[in-house]
């Protein structure tokens, strides 16, 4: 590993080394995730992360970008996302202006006009093209399960050879493939063809010890006692059959809310007042407040 | 809570990774591992095995933990695969061979009725000839049908073409009015050599609305479950990309992939084999909670086919129905008993669910299924 400057992908020699680099960015990953990220870097394969909401899937991409000092290019998926929004789009207004100007000058050579109008400068790069053109870069394709099945076909093409073909312009190819992280909350099954392009990792909720370590690292003002209480409570709530069990993101929010109110340890009054940071469903609040689960929180 | 899995510590009896001295041995050991995984139902095919070997070239193939993670990352495709993977890994590298064969603990109960029973021999069973006979069959309770009638009913069911309510899609198509279509306008202008052309427009296209069918396969529903799953097959065939089918009882199971086959009996065989809880109890509330966690209900028309004999907590069912009614576009409940003379919604499950149901229909005969299909086509009761 180089001592100065950003580490290159090929500089990271072992999973342990990558774990250390992630740790330096305050991302405490367990062994499986570190090996997954290491292989994604070394094999140049996209990494598909599945897991409950709030277990740190998106955060990993952000941290990898910070480690490699590469820009993070994010594509948030949603129903109806299609090619022009993900790959590239032509800047029609400027194209029309160009045509009007050419017309005004009396240049009527159709063939020449066409090559002029479909020039790279009129092309608006959307996230996927931007990732192909930017080196190095980390491409985060967030919540792929929200996009339509059709969109996965587009993605498959790009992730197979990291090249994008613009019919009017030709093929734009990445010299070095970007680091790609896909996340899915598993609201639907991602198509198998896409999965086989990727390394697959199922991200669990962190263990108690790791959660305490993460809380202490991310919130320096947090006392060890509070961190342990928050982690224990979050862990218990995850087993309580709630609609939305809290992830590590929620327990961080909750601990921060408690700290903001000046809490040193967890007491039932404060816990009830700040529960909104941890649980985001009315039914869950009722279950916790009414079902006596809150009493457990003190323990 | 999902616990963080401990990496299985391989024992030292087997051709463990530590013994794989030469790359050739490694290939043989890993190929055998992949084969065992395939037998256990993990999709560890040739291509994925190649990935595993490539991954191992970046790691230390003599370290069991490296082998564990490299295999898990490359050979598994879903969270469902992970327990099987762990089991096979432990067995293959830990001394015992994994049991050859299907997924353990899954009892396959074939529920499809015997096709064309003994009385007809090889002949096609009593084909319903006249229109009036067909009409009788249409209104006959499925549970009271003879084997021959059932066969005919299934044939008619497979032929049923279910239309689908449309919803506005996010995608655009050319249109006479709507928003300006920049791309098409530029191309049109170019075609005319730069001369300002007619402006082109585009508008949102329409897509079929998704339908999710939940079929109760508990004991009290067993006379109807087979036919209802066939209805699911017909719906799925009509709109393959906008239909999901689940069985519910004590273990919610997604049957969409199994029912995708064109041939109804092949599809039904696959579905029967996949359902782990035929003719068991019903915990609808719990099943709905699991279903809602999948987020499949959002914006869809959800059809629950059940008699509402809830064995679990009725208040849980009510809470989940409330949530479902907020997430789904429409909630339809099809109850086979509703078709009976003098039916009144008395079971606790139905009474808890009723306030959250948009359409409460019967589900006992072909005519009732046609009515249901009409509702899915956008008609409102």
Image: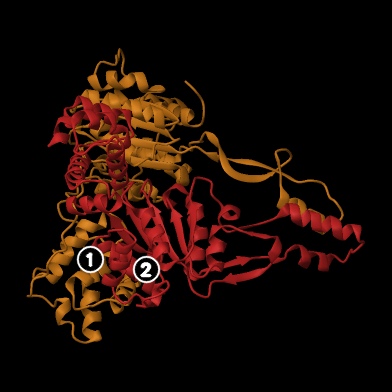
Q: Secondary structure at mark 2?
A: helix
Vertical side of A33 occupied by A212: above or below: above
Q: Colour of chain B?
A: orange
Q: Secondary structure at mark 1?
A: helix
Of labels 1 and 2, the one closer to you: 2
Asked if labels 1 and 2 share a chain, the reply is no
Mark 1 crowd level (few <14, some 14–19, many ≥20, 10 Å Cα): many
Q: In the rendered image, is residue B192 in sight? A: no
Residue A241 point in image, percent of width and height = 22, 37
Quarter holding residue B5: bottom left
Mark 1–mark 2 Cα distance, whole angstroms, equals 23 Å
Q: Residue at x 34, y 75 (%)?
A: A12
Quarter holding residue A252: top left
Q: Residue at x 87, y 54 (%)?
A: B195
In the picture, which quadrant includes the C terminus of chain A?
Answer: top left
Quarter holding residue A273: top left
Between residues B44 and A97, which one lies in front from this camera angle?
Answer: A97
Vertical side of A207 occupied by B38: above or below: below
Q: Is residue A179 left or right of residue B314?
A: right
Chain in red on the image: A
Q: Which mark is residue B37?
A: 1
Q: Mark 2 belongs to which subunit?
A: A
Q: Mark 1 belongs to which subunit?
A: B
Q: Is residue B12 left or right of residue A17?
A: left
Residue A48 point in image, percent of width and height = 37, 59
Q: Which mark is residue A40?
A: 2
Toward the right, the furthest residue is A106
Between residues A296 and A36, which one lies in front from this camera angle?
Answer: A296
Residue B77 point in image, percent of width and height = 32, 60
In the picture, which quadrant includes the N terminus of chain A?
Answer: bottom left
Vertical side of A11 occupied by A120: above or below: above
């Amino acid at each position: 590993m180089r001592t100065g400057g950003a580490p290159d992908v090929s500089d990271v020699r072992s999973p342990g080394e990558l774990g250390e680099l992630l740790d330096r960015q305050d991302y405490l990953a367990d062994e499986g995730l570190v090996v997954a990220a290491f292989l994604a870097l070394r094999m140049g394969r996209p990494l598909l992360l599945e897991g409950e909401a709030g277990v740190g899937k998106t955060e990993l991409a952000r941290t990898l970008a910070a480690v490699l000092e590469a820009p993070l290019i994010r594509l948030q998926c949603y129903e109806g996302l299609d090619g022009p929004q993900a790959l590239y789009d032509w800047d029609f207004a400027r194209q029309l202006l160009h045509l009007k100007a050419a017309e005004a000058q009396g240049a009527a050579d159709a063939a020449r006009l066409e090559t002029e109008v479909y020039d790279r400068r009129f092309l608006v790069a959307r996230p996927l093209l931007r990732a192909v053109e930017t080196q190095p870069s980390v491409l985060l394709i967030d919540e792929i399960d929200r996009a339509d099945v059709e969109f996965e076909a587009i993605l498959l093409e790009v992730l197979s050879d990291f090249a994008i073909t613009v019919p009017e312009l030709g093929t734009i190819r990445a010299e070095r493939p970007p680091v790609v992280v896909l996340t899915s909350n598993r609201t639907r099954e991602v198509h198998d063809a896409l999965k086989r392009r990727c390394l697959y990792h199922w991200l669990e909720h962190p263990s108690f010890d790791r959660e305490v370590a993460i809380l202490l690292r991310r919130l320096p003002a947090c006392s060890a006692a509070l961190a342990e209480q928050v982690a224990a409570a979050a862990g218990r709530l995850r087993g309580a059959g709630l609609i939305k069990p809290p992830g590590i993101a929620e327990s961080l929010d909750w601990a921060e809310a408690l700290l903001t109110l000046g809490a040193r340890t967890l007491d039932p009054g404060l816990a009830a007042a700040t529960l909104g940071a941890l649980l985001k469903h009315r039914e869950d609040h009722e279950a916790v407040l009414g079902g006596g689960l809150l009493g457990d929180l003190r323990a | 809570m999902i616990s963080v899995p401990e990496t299985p510590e391989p024992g030292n009896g087997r051709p463990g990774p530590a013994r794989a001295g030469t790359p050739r041995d490694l290939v043989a050991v890993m190929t055998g591992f992949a084969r065992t995984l395939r037998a256990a139902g993990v999709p560890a095919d040739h291509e994925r095995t190649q990935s595993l070997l490539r991954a191992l070239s970046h790691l230390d193939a003599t370290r069991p933990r490296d082998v564990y993670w490299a295999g898990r990352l490359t050979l598994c495709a879903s969270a469902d695969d992970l327990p099987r993977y762990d089991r096979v890994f432990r067995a293959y590298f830990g001394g015992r061979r994994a049991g050859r064969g299907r997924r353990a603990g899954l009892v396959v109960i074939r529920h499809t009725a015997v096709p064309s029973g003994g009385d007809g021999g090889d002949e096609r069973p009593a084909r319903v000839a006249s229109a009036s006979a067909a009409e009788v069959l249409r209104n006959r309770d499925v549970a009271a049908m003879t084997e021959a009638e059932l066969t005919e009913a299934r044939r008619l069911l497979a032929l049923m073409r279910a239309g689908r309510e449309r919803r506005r899609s996010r995608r655009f198509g050319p249109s006479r009015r709507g928003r300006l279509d920049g791309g098409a306008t530029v191309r049109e202008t170019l075609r005319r050599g730069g001369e300002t052309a007619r402006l082109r427009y585009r508008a949102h296209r329409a897509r079929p609305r998704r339908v999710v069918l939940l079929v109760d396969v508990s004991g009290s529903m067993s006379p109807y479950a087979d036919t209802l799953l066939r209805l699911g097959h017909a719906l799925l065939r009509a709109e393959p990309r906008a239909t999901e089918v689940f069985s519910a009882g004590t273990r919610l199971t997604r049957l969409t992939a199994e029912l995708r086959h064109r041939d109804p009996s092949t599809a039904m065989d696959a579905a029967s084999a996949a359902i782990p809880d035929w003719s068991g109890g019903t915990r609808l509330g719990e099943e709905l909670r699991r279903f809602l966690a999948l987020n499949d209900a959002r914006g869809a028309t959800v059809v629950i086919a059940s008699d509402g004999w809830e064995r679990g907590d009725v208040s849980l069912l009510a809470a989940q129905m409330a949530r479902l009614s907020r997430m789904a576009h429409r909630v339809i409940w099809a109850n086979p008993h509703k078709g009976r003379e003098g039916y009144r919604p008395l079971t606790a499950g139905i009474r808890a669910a009723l306030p959250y149901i948009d359409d409460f229909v019967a589900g006992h005969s072909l005519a009732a299924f046609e009515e249901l299909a009409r509702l899915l086509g956008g008609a409102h009761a």
